[in-house]
Image (spheres, rainbow, N blue to C red):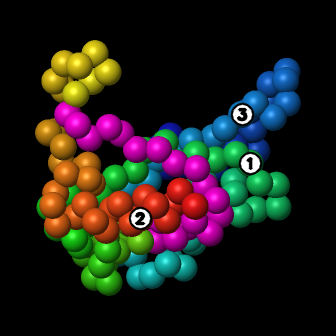
Amino acid sequence: MNYALDLSGVSSLPVQLNVANQVVYSAHDYGFDYSGLTGYSDYVNRITPNWGYLVSGSNPQPLWIGEFGTCNSATTCVSSTNSGDNGYWFGFLTTYMQQYGVDWSYWAINGTQSTGSGRTYGAAEGMAFWIHPGVGAPCQRSARSLAR
């Protein structure tokens, strides 16, 4: 089971609080979790049973993509027609989020923690998408379009 990608259990065991309308479900989505994608409909077919049904089904629920990312080394990281590039998946994710009005966030990419100290975890900015000069413009356009 992958708790970040698989929220299928919510359909049979939803979170129920004493105060209604206070739950937001959160999914994570990364291109490396989808090998062999053949197109947008394939992507939708893969996410629908796991978390997509929360926004596209008969009983929509608040969903937030709390974590996603792509590489930062080339423009194909954010936009590509080649299924071997992260940009292939990223285009599907951003299209889906726009289509269903899914809220999202991203990790800070400035290499510091909230305390101002340098990072002490993970790889150094390998999955951030704003810092590479060739990637910045397409990512900024993606962010603006997602914010609409």
Which portion, as a residue range, is magenta? Answer: 92-111
SS for dot 1: loop
- Image side of residue 72 versus residue 49, left or right: left
Let me know if residue 108 is in the magenta part: yes
Instruction: Give the amino acid type for the residue marked by disc 1 in the picture.
Output: Gln
Instruction: Give the amino acid type for the residue marked by disc 2 in the picture.
Output: Ser
Q: Position of residue 112 (x, y in %)?
A: 22, 28
Q: Can residue 124 be seen in this view?
A: yes
Which residue corresponds to the image point at 32% horizontal and 84% vertical from the top-left? 81
Q: Of tags 2 and 1, which is closer to the observer? A: 2
Q: In which quarter of the image is residue 124?
A: top left
* Rendered image: mark on residue 23: 3
Upstream in sequence: badge 3 or badge 2? 3
- Image side of residue 21 versus residue 79, left or right: right
Q: Do labels 1 and 3 touch, CB within 8 Å?
A: yes
Q: Where is residue 51 in the image (x, y as percent from the top left)?
A: 60, 54
How far is the residue under mark 1 from the one under mark 3?
A: 8 Å
Which residue corresponds to the image point at 53% horizontal and 56% vertical from the top-left? 147
Upstream in sequence: badge 2 or badge 1? 1
How far is the residue under mark 3 from the one under mark 2?
A: 27 Å
Q: Position of residue 79 (x, y in %)?
A: 32, 74
Q: Can residue 9 be seen in this view?
A: no
Q: Quadrant of residue 18?
A: top right
Q: Name the residue under label 1.
A: 61
SS for dot 2: helix
Q: Name the residue under label 2.
A: 142
* Rendered image: mark on residue 120: none
Q: Is residue 44 above or below residue 119?
A: below
- Image side of residue 6 versus residue 138, left or right: right
Which residue corresponds to the image point at 20% horizontal and 34% vertical from the top-left? 111
